[in-house]
Amino acid sequence: MEPGKLRQRGKDKRRRAILEAARGLLLEKGIDGVSMRQIADISELGLGTIYSYFSGKTEIYATLSVEAFDLIHESLAAAVSPGASPQDRIRAIGKALLGFSVKHKAYFDFLDYFVSSSRRMFPVQTKIHIDKHGEKMLAPLIEAIEEGVKIGVFKPVDAKQYSLIFLGMLHGITHLRKLQETMLKGHRFDELYHQAVGCILDSLCSKQ
Amino acid sequence: MEPGKLRQRGKDKRRRAILEAARGLLLEKGIDGVSMRQIADISELGLGTIYSYFSGKTEIYATLSVEAFDLIHESLAAAVSPGASPQDRIRAIGKALLGFSVKHKAYFDFLDYFVSSSRRMFPVQTKIHIDKHGEKMLAPLIEAIEEGVKIGVFKPVDAKQYSLIFLGMLHGITHLRKLQETMLKGHRFDELYHQAVGCILDSLCSKQ
Amino acid sequence: MEPGKLRQRGKDKRRRAILEAARGLLLEKGIDGVSMRQIADISELGLGTIYSYFSGKTEIYATLSVEAFDLIHESLAAAVSPGASPQDRIRAIGKALLGFSVKHKAYFDFLDYFVSSSRRMFPVQTKIHIDKHGEKMLAPLIEAIEEGVKIGVFKPVDAKQYSLIFLGMLHGITHLRKLQETMLKGHRFDELYHQAVGCILDSLCSKQ
Amino acid sequence: MEPGKLRQRGKDKRRRAILEAARGLLLEKGIDGVSMRQIADISELGLGTIYSYFSGKTEIYATLSVEAFDLIHESLAAAVSPGASPQDRIRAIGKALLGFSVKHKAYFDFLDYFVSSSRRMFPVQTKIHIDKHGEKMLAPLIEAIEEGVKIGVFKPVDAKQYSLIFLGMLHGITHLRKLQETMLKGHRFDELYHQAVGCILDSLCSKQ
DNA sequence: CATGAATGAGGTTTCATTCAT
DNA sequence: CATGAATGAAACCTCATTCAT
């Protein structure tokens, strides 16, 4: 391997280290717990180094946002088996999303916060760019619903609209997990989650 | 009226002024736009005075959280007409929640943020106290669903679980409103919202 | 004395302390030696306190500039005895300026720097305000020259123009003092200075 | 030409590129606008490379100072026609200095700043070296004045002292140009300048 | 009891310089 | 020999909180 590649790999590694540090801090200490100093310490890089990889905190956040959306998209896309029935595909997507929200809790909390406040946080151009990645997430869902409508197992609906409802719902439910020790006491979160997926399927399948 | 009462009233007024100022700032400038100095300026009180009404910023946030939950509860409770059918009651609750999220946007964004991060933000005792108020919100919904199950228009479900799904979903959908200019482009938000309510009703009414 | 006055006096004292610290640092360590931290340390105030007296470094510099010009103006105005001849008045002004440049060396170096770079340093509005105070300095000189022209001891000249030349010259000469150990070695600075004043008088008195 | 020379030429070119970049930045953005990074970018060299030509920023400034003085000296020396009268030679020198201050504004501002603060900026040895080059500037003036004194058109004066006054004055006047939009409003700068030169000549020619 | 001046920890960011490649 | 990635000291500034008046 030529030296250029090695160096490149080192750069990538550092870049990743920075993003992981930032993401980790975000999860562990919340949005106010993220300081450039801490990111530097955790990623074991000099403070100035951070600024040669990212123009500032905002860019780090923007990058994480895009990454998060892309990762979710990948998870969802990977979850659907081509031959499966629309219902199963939707269930699989629900499951994948739940899995993601458990495995990459950090990303989820992060998106939660940034979807809420990104208009204030990011320059409008950046926000549009991020949202484009967010929109990709919907594709696997839309396809599954359209397929179901086409073959007649679902009632005719606007596939994108239902996708938004589905994602919004699951997101909202995931949000509730924070209340596990209080409002959710006595309820199993995953059951709640599956029930919610079932709820959407009920609606899609309901004649009327 | 004796002087004590008058003074009491003045104190209440100041307390309210502080909370309004804090809430207003939160809406207008986001979580980073709230500083004690600004709260003092807007509420037309001295900076030090704030601290004789609240122990600090955290207590202000906690108080606002409780208030927000209580207000939502009131809205929902007021929305249900005693004689209405379970379906109509649920529709009314959905409508009321949508209305609230429009009218009191500030509170909604606020809860969004604080439900997410309250574990880090508040001492555990405070958090439990807040969540208790959050839980009250569910009551009108639970009642409507239980009624529907009892009279047989809904399939037999765990009423609290469905309530959580319902609220979670609506909350998630509301969250999406932030994406109106990007992901939601071409979709009317309120339609999406009503569709979501319909979705739950579909599920509740679907025969097995 | 009522308490308000006392407090006011304390505020004034602190304000002065800040300005003195800044001026002192400027003299001792040069423009790069002035940091807000150091100003705070020397003035024995908290760092944040500085910012409640001045909006930032720029405002401190602007204030010092204005003060410097005003002080010089006072020195020059005080130097002229009403009954003295125009020549004597000009000599007195020269002497006063020399005296000032020795006694308030800091201010002089300061002006030196800020006249040079104020366009980049200050917002245009601020610069205009500062320069207005600078212009006042000329008044005593202009009056003396006009008087001399009127009574015929000076040849007819544009009084303001000659004033500018006079001040510019003395300022330039003062600048040279920095070179006392090298270029000026073997020359007594004050002699140089008086010679320069004489030079202007020669010109003003030269027939034709 | 042997390869050593070629390489040498490349080195010289780079050295010059660095100095030009530094000087240009100084002119365009002022003293705070000069960073090693920018010098590297503009001179199209690597950042590290700068350090193999100069030991650091200070040495770059020192070199520029020497260069500036040498350039001025050349300008002044070139201005005097051997056969001209002392008065004309002095006028020519004044004109040359004015021309230089317009054409090489950067150098002038630069000297302004560094003469003021060089004691703090440079190690004493460096400063002495720089000042030696500064002193050379005086030579053409001294010669003209001495000649004038010798042939009796000037009164007997200390030629070096008058030279210092002359240069100091012109420098001071040049300084004033910064105030063109405020204090100097309504005055033509070059007129002021020529008047100042005339002023010195008046004095030199004044009997006793 | 209301006030706001004072505080200083901690935030983000820049930049001269070094050193491995 | 040229390079530029890495570094961390140090800059400016904000803000929650305290406490003397």
Image (spheres, coloured by chain):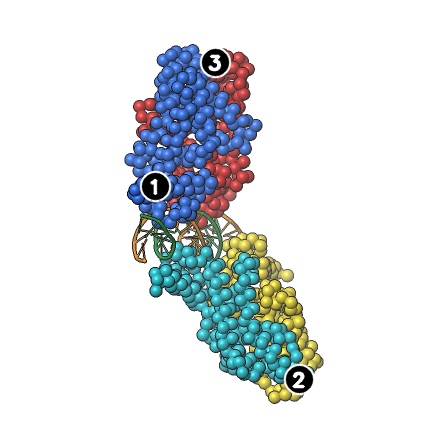
Chain colours: A red, B blue, C cyan, D yellow, E green, F orange
* Image depth: mark 3 or mark 2 in front: 2
Residue, x 39% and y 25% (percent of image)?
Answer: B77
| Residue type, label 3 | Ser
Specify the subunit that label 2 lies on. Answer: C
Query: Crowding near pointer 2: few (<14 within 10 Å), some, many (20+)?
Result: few
Dot label at residue B9: 1
Residue identified by numbered label 2: C207
* Image depth: mark 2 or mark 1 in front: 1
| Residue type, label 2 | Lys
Find residue B36 and report its horizontal and vertical position in percent. Answer: 39, 46
Q: Viewer-proximal residue, A70 or A204?
A: A204
Dot label at residue A206: 3
Specify the quadrant of the image occupied by residue D96. bottom right
Specify the subunit that label 1 lies on. Answer: B
Find residue A189 and report its horizontal and vertical position in percent. Answer: 36, 24
Q: CA distance from mark 2 to mark 1?
A: 87 Å
Find residue A59 and report its horizontal and vertical position in percent. Answer: 49, 42
